[in-house]
């Protein structure tokens, strides 16, 4: 076991992540990318040759890369390496214990969001005189109403979204299922959008060009990039100076819930966070709101 090379073991690790752990395709792609960089630095060495000194030299290498990698990205490299080492230890390969690797300290994460007034400006900036405009309004409404990730939104199919019950199920990171709820306004715009459709394609959100062949309907599904561009261009038209992305709308959804008294555990469920720690990045916003109330009431 000590003679096993990391290149071959990386393949085993990625297969384990896909089959045994059922991790998302994106996670596996990231693991492959980060571990490939480690292999390029070390060469195809034996797993027993991975030492703390070697890892520290690798960390220094990452820190000096040109263009310089952010501390957050450097952390992702180390997290992938630690997951790989944990897999090796669990399978009785002699290597460096993952807990010996320290992650670089990064500044406390801050959340960017847009206000309810800015969200309304975003809605109002959409030209509703065309089918494309009605589709775009439905997209923005759905992102804000549900807090969906862009990957989750683009994968939606018509038959899974129940407009009468105003809810549907999605599978997020790690294929974890969760129930998503729709506001009355979002249901209205989704209904208006679907009434403009003259096709039977399965994808909920499609582009306005391309094949009309029902067997080729999947090719009409909007890409994540297309959805990001719809949001970005709408924000520019609305005159919003902040950078606005589908993920910013997800942050705005969570922020609006918390500022209106939602329990953080409920927000965790609605966002599909595996850990409450992830959701707690929003708590400083509610703390600030409480401070404002306190100062207003006790001058």
Image (cartoon, helix red, strand yellow):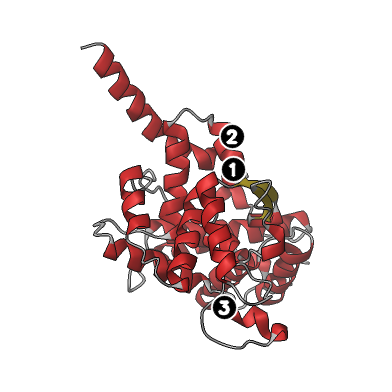
Q: Nearer the viewer, residue 125 or 40?
A: 125
Q: Which residue is mark 2?
A: 266
Reading the chain from its start, which is encountered first: label 2 or label 3? 3
Reading the chain from its start, which is encountered first: label 1 or label 3? 3
Whether residue 282 sits left or right of residue 178 in the image: it is left
Query: Circle 3 sits in a helix, a strand or a loop, which is it?
Result: loop
* Mark 1 residue crowding within 10 angstroms, few (<14) / some (14–19) / many (20+): some
Q: CA distance from mark 1 to mark 3?
A: 44 Å
Rendering coords of residue 265 (x, y %): 58, 33
Q: Quadrant of residue 269?
A: top right
Q: CA distance from mark 2 to mark 3?
A: 47 Å
Looking at the image, which residue sits at the far left? 299
Q: Quadrant of residue 236?
A: bottom left
Q: Which residue is mark 1?
A: 270
Q: Residue at x 66, y 79 (%)?
A: 218
Whether residue 39 sits left or right of residue 294 in the image: it is right
Q: Which residue is mark 3?
A: 43
- Is residue 220 at least partly visible in the picture? yes
């Amino acid at each position: 076991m000590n003679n096993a090379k990391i290149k071959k073991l990386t393949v085993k690790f990625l297969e384990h992540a896909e089959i045994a752990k059922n991790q998302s395709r994106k996670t596996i792609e990231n693991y492959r990318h980060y571990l490939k960089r480690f292999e390029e630095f070390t060469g195809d060495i034996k797993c027993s040759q991975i030492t703390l000194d070697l890892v520290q030299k690798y960390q220094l290498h990452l820190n000096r890369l040109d263009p310089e990698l952010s501390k957050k990205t450097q952390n992702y490299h180390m997290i992938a390496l630690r997951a790989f080492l944990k897999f090796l230890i669990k399978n009785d390969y002699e290597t460096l214990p993952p807990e010996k690797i320290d992650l670089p300290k990064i500044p406390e994460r801050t959340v960017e969001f847009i206000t309810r007034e800015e969200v309304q400006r975003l809605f109002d900036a959409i030209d509703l005189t065309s089918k494309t405009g009605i589709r775009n309004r439905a997209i923005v409404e759905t992102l804000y109403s549900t807090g969906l990730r862009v990957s989750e939104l683009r994968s939606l199919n018509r038959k899974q979204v129940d407009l009468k019950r105003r809810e549907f199920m999605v599978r997020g990171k790690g294929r974890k299922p969760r129930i998503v709820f729709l506001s009355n306004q979002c249901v209205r715009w989704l209904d208006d959008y679907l009434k403009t459709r003259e096709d039977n394609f399965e994808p909920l959100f499609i582009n306005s060009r391309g094949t009309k062949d029902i067997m080729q309907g999947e090719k009409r599904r909007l890409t994540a990039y297309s959805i990001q561009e719809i949001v970005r261009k709408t924000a520019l038209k609305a005159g919003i100076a902040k950078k606005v992305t589908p993920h910013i709308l997800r942050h705005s959804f969570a922020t609006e819930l918390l500022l209106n008294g939602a329990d953080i555990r409920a927000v965790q469920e609605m966002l599909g966070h595996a850990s409450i720690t992830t959701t707690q990045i929003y708590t400083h916003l509610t703390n600030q709101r409480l401070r404002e109330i306190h100062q207003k009431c006790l001058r």
